[in-house]
Image (cartoon, helix red, strand yellow):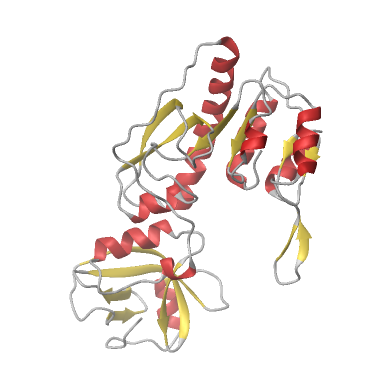
Amino acid sequence: MGTPRFAVPSLKALAQSRHQIIAVVTNPDRPQGRGRQLASPPVKEQALKLGLEVLQPAAVNGPELAAALAARTPDLFVVVAFSVLPRHLLAIPRLGSINLHPSLLPAYRGAAPIIWAVANGEKETGITTFQLSPRIDAGHILLQRRFAIGHDETAGELEARLCVEGAKMVVETVDGLEEGRLTGQPQSTDGVSRAPKLTKKDGQIDWNQPAEQVRNLVRSMNPVPGAYTHWQGKTLKVHRTQHAASAGAPGTVLCADGRRGLTVACGEGALQLTQVQPAGKAVMEGTAFVRGYPIAAGMRLG
């Protein structure tokens, strides 16, 4: 059970393992892009390539999905980036249900653990497989591994690493459950933190914050939804930054030079905006933005 690209490596790894995939459950096709054409979820696309049966329920709570799954008498549900399963679905598989979560549970329970870990400046995170229970991300831990977060690593880059490592752990977990080698361990009641679903406002840059905090926000929102500020009444997304040896009033453009790029003051320190994206345009280097748009030192962002 899964929908986005993060779940695709796990599906492929299970398909290549000794285990049999009875069916793949994913979200319905959705309109996407400016043309609003129906597009299949990445997991569906991969499942069809593998010749697997695909179920796309309109809602996971409906009786149709429960009946379809129960009729297939599954041993185990493997859930990676999917909806919260209701109790009546959790009761179906003989060995229960497991989930892959990209954090060191109980830290960063919720929908966006990678983004929030990067935004908060964490130096390490990890992946966890655990037994699903009615409480979100609170079931017994089966396997867990730690991974360092690179100093300049974006959330997108970290996700690309963790989904591959997570796929290996998923197969290792299923192997261990089949062989009776794995026993779930209760999560600690200490260190519980949340990673809620993002809102658009979460990506708005507050130039009054220290430069390092702003830099972490930019990293966490790359590639999507993108950290942003405002300039001349329009949105300006900021995709990459680096520290600059400057200072000034927060949000003030300190340098706008076609060779040296674009530098903006923060509450403490300053940042060079090395990759930006004006409204309706492609991502570009900060130097290219300065050369192509009427921005100058002394202007204010935000």
The image quadrant that residue 126 belongs to is top left
Residue 90 vs 263, above or below: the answer is above
Q: Quadrant of the N terminus?
A: top right
Residue 203 vs 189, above or below: the answer is below
Q: How many numbered marks does the figure carry?
A: 0
Q: Quadrant of the C terminus?
A: bottom left
Measured from the top left, where is residue 214 in percent x and y? 31, 65
In this rendering, position of residue 27 left or right of residue 117: right
Query: Residue drawn 35% across and 82% down?
Result: 301
Query: Residue drawn 39% across and 53% down?
Result: 116
In this rendering, position of residue 28 left or right of residue 239: right
In this rendering, position of residue 145 left or right of residue 10: left
The image quadrant that residue 108 belongs to is top left
- Front-most of 232 and 262? 232
Measured from the top left, where is residue 33 in percent x and y? 70, 67
The image quadrant that residue 219 belongs to is bottom left
Measured from the top left, where is residue 17 in percent x and y? 66, 21
Query: Residue drawn 36% across and 61% down?
Result: 217
Query: Residue drawn 65% across and 25% down?
Result: 76
- Front-most of 59 and 272? 59
Measured from the top left, where is residue 158 in percent x and y? 44, 45
